[in-house]
Image (cartoon, helix red, strand yellow):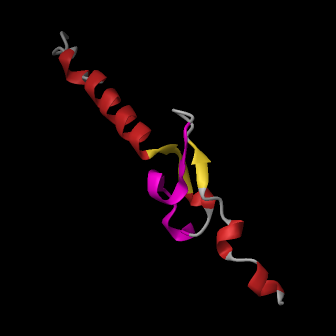
Amino acid sequence: MEFDEEFDLDHLLFRERRCRSCGIRKDLLNDFYLIRKNRKGFPSAYSYECKSCTITRVTVSRMTSKIFDKWEYPDW
């Protein structure tokens, strides 16, 4: 048996990652966003926050940040 036949690329890559926000272990390729397009095969190319937590974080922050509600014309 040769060394190349014993190991596959799947053995070297991490297939699961724990989400930084919710703490649940999820599949790396399907449940995390690819943030570095030029390093597609590496686990470091994916974010540390899962897609569902990212969507929740963005929608909540967009709802609460209403800058123009408090804006008034400056009284010079």
Most distant residue in the bottom direction: 1
Taking 59 as reference, is 26 left or right? right
Give whichever of 43, 12 is nearer the camera.
12
Q: Which residues are magenta?
A: 24-40
Rendering coords of residue 68 (x, y %): 20, 22
Establish if 43 lies above or below 59. below
Rendering coords of residue 28 (x, y %): 54, 55
Taking 19 as reference, is 30 left or right? left
Establish if 25 lies above or below 46. above
Residue 59: quadrant of the picture: top left
Taking the spot 39% from the left edge, 33% from the top edge, the residue there is: 57
Q: Is residue 28 part of the magenta span, yes or no?
A: yes
- Quarter of the figure with the N terminus: bottom right
Rendering coords of residue 10 (x, y %): 64, 70
Q: Is residue 19 part of the magenta span, yes or no?
A: no
Establish if 4 lies above or below 23. below
Taking the spot 22% from the left edge, 14% from the top edge, the residue there is: 70
Taking the spot 36% from the left edge, 34% from the top edge, the residue there is: 56
Rendering coords of residue 76 (x, y %): 20, 11
